[in-house]
Amino acid sequence: MADLSRISYLQKGKGKDLVFFHGYLASKESFAAQIGYFSRYCRVTAIDFPGFGGAQPLTQPFSVSDYAEWTREALTALGLSRPHVIAHSFGCRVAVKMASADGEIFDKLLLTGPAGIILRRGAKYRLQVGTYRLVRKIAPKFADRHFGSEEYRSLSPVMRESYKKIVNEDLREDARRIGNEVLLVEGREDKTTPPEAAEIYRSCLRHGRMKTMEGGHFSFVEYPVAFNLIAEEFFFHG
């Protein structure tokens, strides 16, 4: 597990705890507009997951469960008590995994651009994977440089192994175990985690709702006012 002696986080405001979980290759600063807005009503805490932002690098590959356990320990160390959650993309994976294991660890959850649903992949994708595996047997360095997403190619060897663990886990069964109120906020132009995936999440959740808004995968950055109003309504007036 990561060393909790140096948690990279920022905390601002007083009142009800609200915690932010960022996306993959992002950091706590991605929620700047939300932190500024909600710190007027809450004690907001944004953390960097190990391997990202100002956090310590990974020394071994983390799965979603490893990130969930690290985060559970981090929230305890920071003295957070049953916070509301705003999570984006990869951060949604961590929040779902945590909430599925402990229904009391969070209050309400808002998941935006939620990752964790593996959609059915077509013949083109299967051909690409098969070609990659064949080439990797012959020329592994060439394969790693020329196959896979730009995101994957930018990672260190340890982070690549972690990435593979993360993206190959489907969280539908975890979502079915969640009893909390959950709001999914999806950008209509999101190509990274499309509305189809968010709708599958919603169908798995016992108390899940879904709202769409303008924007893509980072709709909370593109349209912060609209996003913040949706979040405020859900957390405090819903």
Image (cartoon, rainbow, N blue to C red):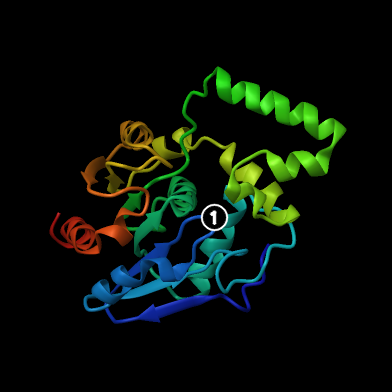
Q: 222 above or below 111?
A: below
Picture layout, residue 211 above or below residue 3: above
Q: Which residue is mark 1?
A: 68
36 sits left or right of 8 in the view: left
Q: Which residue: 22% across, 59% down? A: 235
> Is residue 77 placed above or below 108 in the rendered structure?
below
Question: Could you tell whether 20 is left or right of 123 in the image?
Answer: left
As rendered, which of 125 and 28 lies closer to the eye? Answer: 125
Q: Position of residue 102 (x, y in %)?
A: 45, 51
SS state under label 1: helix
Number of numbered discs overlaid on the protein picture: 1
The image quarter containing residue 41 is bottom left
Q: In this view of the protein, which residue sits in the foreground, 145 or 72?
A: 145
Q: Residue furthest left?
A: 237
Q: Amino acid at mark 1?
A: Ala
For residue 158, side relative to residue 12 (left or right): right
Assess disc 1: are there few (<14), some (14-19) or many (≥20) residues with their C-alpha within 10 Å of its C-alpha.
many
Q: Position of residue 186 (x, y in %)?
A: 29, 45
* 126 or 234, nearer to the observer: 126
Q: Residue at x 59, y 43 (%)?
A: 149
* Residue 27 x, y percent position in the rendering: 49, 66
Q: Quadrant location of the C terminus?
A: bottom left
Residue name at image x 41 percent, y 39 percent: 175
Residue at the extreme bottom:
13
